[in-house]
Amino acid sequence: MTQLTALISVSDKTGIVDFARALHALNVRLLSTGGTAKLLADAGLPVTEVADHTGFPEMLDGRVKTLHPKIHGGLLARRDVPEHMKALADHGIATIDILAVNLYPFEATVAKAGCTLEDAIENIDIGGPAMVRSAAKNWKDVTVLTDAGQYAGVLEELKAHGKTSDKTRFACSVAAFNRIAQYDAAISNYLSARQDDGSLAAYPAQMNSTFVKVQDLRYGENSHQTAALYRDLYPAPGSIVTGKQLQGKELSYNNIADADAAWECVKSFSAPACVIVKHANPCGVAVAATPAEAYAKAFKTDPTSAFGGIIAFNREVDGAAAELVSKQFVEVLMAPGFTAEAREIFKSKVNVRLMEIALPPGGDTPWLQGRNLGDSKRIGSGLLLQSADNHFLKASDLKVVTTLQPSAQQLEDLMFAWTVAQYVKSNAIVFCGGGMTLGVGAGQMSRVDSTKIAAIKAANASLDLKGSVVASDAFFPFRDGLDVLADAGASCVIQPGGSMRDEEVIAAANERGVAMVFTGVRHFRH
């Protein structure tokens, strides 16, 4: 059998010595460049420098070393085309059968504070992507590796068969082209965001996004639509795509959308919390001493809507919580974990989808809180981009605008209500009290109608709104909405303020004996 040749040139040297040692044991000839060649030689491996292989020295500070016919001819030549093989023989070019290359760390470089344009440019790899493209194009004859995670599988095939399979080579080729696309996208995003003063624009002149498919879905929002789930190339810790499904039917498009709404809301609370979502809106939210108590309170808000809903906890689900939840029809149940007792309770509920999602580590940045940095929305032949609504209100941010001052307990409930309102579709009105939602009005064209609906839902659930607090995601344009919530029994309200008629609304609140605080920030969620 003809001896195979492997060219190894890596920036990230994770596992490369062991990989090269295993190749050498399989009688594979090793070619390498620069620091990688030195590393392999220091490990006692026989390695040929690319400069010795090509007969042409590295030049221009290493910018030109692999851009040579003896490299690209060896990668691109088709072994099944006689003319290709004759050309190699005529010019003394040997074939290269395995290419292990990962690229200069451009993404890591530009992510560093103080990165200059010069630093960025010097970390744009040229020879690496060129070799990867050549090898990936000729996948029928060349195995191209762009990630250390691929080494073990390739070695296994080489040991068993002396070569890699067509399936493996093609998969490696696809992964290689994907990596080049990611790399080029990062370069384009960075350079097209550069401003004349050296700063980076929040929105680059060209936006290149990279998502990786997680799975195909049975259908989209409706059965006549197709769908698939993708994740960010580097998903934030504690985000829904990092979760693991423990049991139940395959998640649908709507399941995932609703589950995301529930998970984003529940992880906003530090106390044990439960969120029940139906059609992307929270229909019951509560905090309590235990998950079971939180669920019981959340369920009271709207038992009818909770039927067939999505439930999320920010604490491990124990037997007590599982016993309560198992009594209702639930589509998806999410939590950071489930006790053995809880898993046993749901074992017979084979259609219930259990999702285990680790909570984010927490910290000062949206990333550490497991949140997106930006949001997008497709429009006709276009894309709307915005920074994500990651504003977090502190009690010290509140401005009391009425004569009546809210009590300490009311302030606590107002903060709870404001957190819930952020996850309710606009126009959003949320009645709360005692750490739980009492009535939720969502998605109406009129804020007055949302207020009326929230009060109706509370009445249907036999929940008393007397003394309750209310959160409104945006300002009251007229006093009519304030009058409706006062009629329902609300004692205080939290809202952004900023209306031309703020004084009219404040006067109405004073007249009705309702305390009011302004946040200065709204939470539209369309």
Image (tube, rainbow, N blue to C red):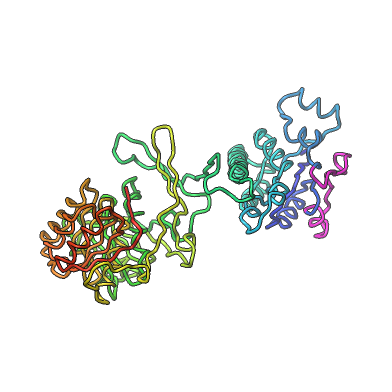
Between 83 and 382, the one lying in front of the other is 382
- Image quadrant in which the N terminus is located: top right
| Residue that lies at the very extreme toward the top in this rendered image | 83
Please say whether residue 41 is one of the residues in the magenta stretch: yes
- Percent across and percent down for residue 340 are 35, 69
Q: Residue at left 49%, top 59%?
A: 367
Between 413 and 147, the one lying in front of the other is 413
Please say whether residue 340 is one of the residues in the magenta stretch: no
Q: Which residues are magenta?
A: 36-63
Side of 249 relative to 364 (left or right): left
- Percent across and percent down for residue 153 are 61, 50
Vertical placement of 312 versus 102: above or below?
below
Side of 239 relative to 60 (left or right): left
- Percent across and percent down for residue 177 are 61, 39
Q: Residue at left 71%, top 27%?
A: 80
Vertical placement of 189 versus 361: above or below?
above
Q: Is residue 324 visible?
A: no
Residue 484 sits in quarter: bottom left
Between 431 and 347, the one lying in front of the other is 431
Between 516 and 78, the one lying in front of the other is 516
